[in-house]
Amino acid sequence: MSRDKQPDTKLAVVIMAAGKGTRLRTRRPKVLHEVGGKALLSHVIATSSELADGADIYVVVGHEADRVRKAVADTGVQFVDQKEQRGTGHAIQCAREAIAKYDHILVLSGDVPLISATTLQHLMTMHLAQGAAMSILTARPADPTGYGRVIRHAPDRPEVDAIVEQKALKPDQQQIGEINSGIYAFQTKPLLAHIGRLSTDNPHGELYLTDMAAHLKAGGEKVVALEVGDPEEVQGGNTIAELMAIDARMRMAVANRLMAAGVTIFRPETCVIDKDVKVEADTVIEPFVQLLGNTKIGTDGRIRSYSVIENCTLGNDVLVRQGCVLGESTVADGARIGPFAHLRPGSEIGQDAHVGNFVETKKAKLGKGAKANHLTYLGDAEIGAGSNIGAGVITCNYDGVNKHQTRIGQGAFVGSDSTLVAPVAIGDGAYVGAGSCITRDVPSGALAVGRARQTTKEGWVEARRAQREKKD
Ligand code: UD1
Ligand code: MG
């Protein structure tokens, strides 16, 4: 399909993405609804880019066009405007000028995201081999309701007479199980020669691209169908329920890929794992875990239930206990996190370090074996190897205008309920007494205590009682 090597097969991809998605009943345009962690349209664009020799990609936009353009601006696709959405046929009419210079176009629907590049290649190969003016990708799903049906000229022949939309089906066409996927290859010349014939004489009053099958056939052109093996590949997402079925399928495919590579996933149907996530063998993922973005997890780890990990790198033998939230952070081998810990962006948890219950970190670096086991906030902080941060310690990193650093050396001990007012440094092996408010640097090996001295009044309770009784 190279445009340079075979000028006779110059190809463009046209993705129809201008529709509103009325059946979704949402304000968000249909093609920006997310499945498998990204917008429907992004999936279709990604698949189009996989095609051999990089065909030019055009996206037809209309409803909320600016929002759609913006969402996929970084993909380098070109846009065609369909100001009024008068149907799929009208979408391609709007692309007339853009497609005229290509010999063939591959038309994809923005709401059919599971289609594979391999299947599209098969469609193109058949289209070229048959010398067809229009080649329709079809399927036989268990329930064809709602889809356009394909009327073949004869049962075992590829030639097609027409596509009939659900609402226009005649009683004797109701039992046809072969549906139109909304994906087609066209020879541009005959398409442009006949596309003006489309009319709105149908139950929706729209210009249907599907009517091109009958028009091209009537014009003496060849129209053929190619049935996909797996009907779920061309499942359309027209309602939220259909979108969620597509999402579940994508997630399951990812889980299956990981399980095939030696990752144990308990109740995989409850886990949400993005496509680009990498997990090494012998790691265990418990139910209701979310692994998002480009998260990478090493071997022998365990991610316990209800944890959400996004764009993080975890080493080997890492335990993330229940209910943790980890984002844009790294966790080295053997570290223990949680339960209920929050690693915010820029956290670097060292080898064998412990981050315990209700601990929040942000741009915090914990050295090898450092421990912050309970109820702590560590922000803009560096904690040396082997240091122990007691329960309730807080780095006061923000003065209302700027953020400041706290530096704690190796083997230091910060007693419970201490506040470290940054910028401040605590040297190697230093001790901070519990309940201290530390505002000045503590040298290595020193003990700092910064709290009000305790006063104890012996017999005070008895004395007060006696005083009260006297009053009464
Ligand atoms: C369409 C087909 C139907 C097929 C089904 C497969 C038509 C008339 N029917 O129906 O035979 O079985 O897909 O999923 O084509 N769009 C535009 N501009 C418009 C209207 C739609 O760009 O004016 C875009 C939509 O954003 C969508 C795609 O075209 O991405 C398909 O439109 P949709 O309304 O979903 O068509 P279906 O009813 O699903
Ligand atoms: Mg649709």
Image (cartoon, rainbow, N blue to C red):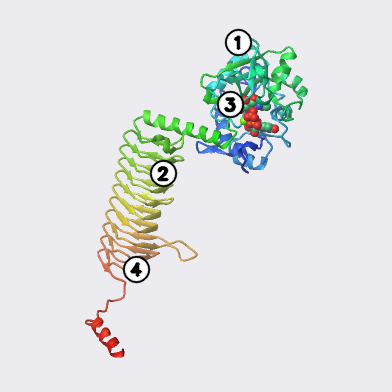
Q: Percent position (x, y) of residue 396?
A: 40, 64
Q: Is residue 433 above or below residue 266?
A: below
Q: Quadrant of the C terminus?
A: bottom left
Q: Measure how far apart labels 2 and 4 are at the Cα level.
A: 32 Å
Other-residue count near label 3 (Cα within 10 Å), few / some / many at <14 / 14–19 / ≥20:
some
- Image point 40% across, 39% down: which residue? 296
Closer to the eye: label 3 or 2? 2
Query: As drawn, is 399 to the left or to the right of 146?
Result: left
Q: Earlier in the sequence, mark 1 or mark 2?
A: 1
Mark 4 secondary-structure assignment: strand
For this rendering, which residue is in front, 198 or 66? 198
Mark 2 secondary-structure assignment: loop
Q: Percent position (x, y) of residue 433?
A: 27, 67
Q: Measure how far apart labels 3 and 1 are at the Cα level.
A: 35 Å
Query: Where is mark 1, residue-wise?
Result: 155
Quadrant of the rendered image containing residue 393:
bottom left
Residue at the extreme left of the image, as rendered: 458
Query: Where is mark 3, residue-wise?
Result: 54
Q: Earlier in the sequence, mark 4 or mark 1?
A: 1
Q: Amino acid at mark 3?
A: Gly
Q: Amino acid at mark 4?
A: Ile
Query: Where is mark 4, residue-wise?
Result: 438
Quadrant of the rendered image containing residue 188:
top right
Q: Measure how far apart labels 3 and 2 are at the Cα level.
A: 32 Å
Closer to the eye: label 2 or 4? 2
Q: Amino acid at mark 1?
A: Pro
Q: Amino acid at mark 2?
A: Cys
Query: Where is mark 2, residue-wise?
Result: 312
Quadrant of the rendered image containing residue 178:
top right
Q: Is residue 57 visible?
A: no
